[in-house]
Amino acid sequence: DQQVKQNSPSLSVQEGRISILNCDYTNSMFDYFLWYKKYPAEGPTFLISISSIKDKNEDGRFTVFLNKSAKHLSLHIVPSQPGDSAVYFCAARSGNTPLVFGKGTRLSVIA
Amino acid sequence: DSGVTQTPKHLITATGQRVTLRCSPRSGDLSVYWYQQSLDQGLQFLIQYYNGEERAKGNILERFSAQQFPDLHSELNLSSLELGDSALYFCASSAGQGNEKLFFGSGTQLSVL
């Protein structure tokens, strides 16, 4: 049973445009959500997070939105750059439980 | 560089064999986590150790075992290997028992032939 779902395996975006990566979850007990970014031959690296008491968190070009009623979060990257091309993982946790990850979305930013 | 070291980077072995994957956490981190990434799968949580003690267990097979040593490094032992065990195995560390931010190593690519 997949508790964190990233339904788009891949996404292509033109450089300078907005990238929107989506994530859905089923466990209503999740209280903290994170996005990780992974380049080939490297481990995932933390990108941005959001607590369930907020609906938006912003860090430079990256913004995460949380819609608790829809059990949905999204990562917006504006403007997209070729260096943003990577696999993005959505993750969530409940209390101090280990992170549960989605399958990832491969973002390609085309110059 | 995350500060988490995993060895070896690549491992090729045959079915039925046993292998050991090694992980050194970031300096000062007490928790070590093991994750498996198979083809078309996300990062599947296997097991967590905190300061030498097992803290949480996920979808870890009985053929797999792990431990965390007094110097806080961890080893993941995989035995009676099957073709389906071929995957990328990641180790991650964090400072506390449930810190939300994990720091990942670059992984060990295991190929079972």
Image (cartoon, coloured by chain):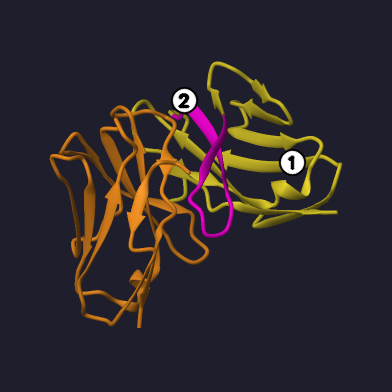
* Image quadrant in which you'd find residue A93: top left
Q: Residue furthest top?
A: A53
Q: Residue at x 64, y 20 (%)?
A: A55
Q: Amino acid at mark 2?
A: Asp
Instruction: Read off the chain for label 2.
Output: A
Task: Give the image location of residue A22, x and y in percent.
Answer: 66, 42
Instruction: Read off the chain for label 1.
Output: A
Q: Nearer the viewer, residue B39 or B25?
A: B25
For residue A31, which numbered disc appears in the image? 2
Callout 2 secondary element: loop
Chain letter for the yellow part: A
Q: Nearer the viewer, residue A62 or A53?
A: A62
Magenta residues span A30-48
Please indicate whether residue B111 sits to the left or right of residue B30 in the image.
right
Task: Give the image location of residue A105, x and y in percent.
Answer: 63, 52
Mark 1, residue position = A20
Q: Residue at x 55, y 47 (%)?
A: A5
Please indicate whether residue A37 sits to the left or right of residue B10 in the image.
right
Using the rendered image, report if marks 2 and 1 lie on a common chain: yes
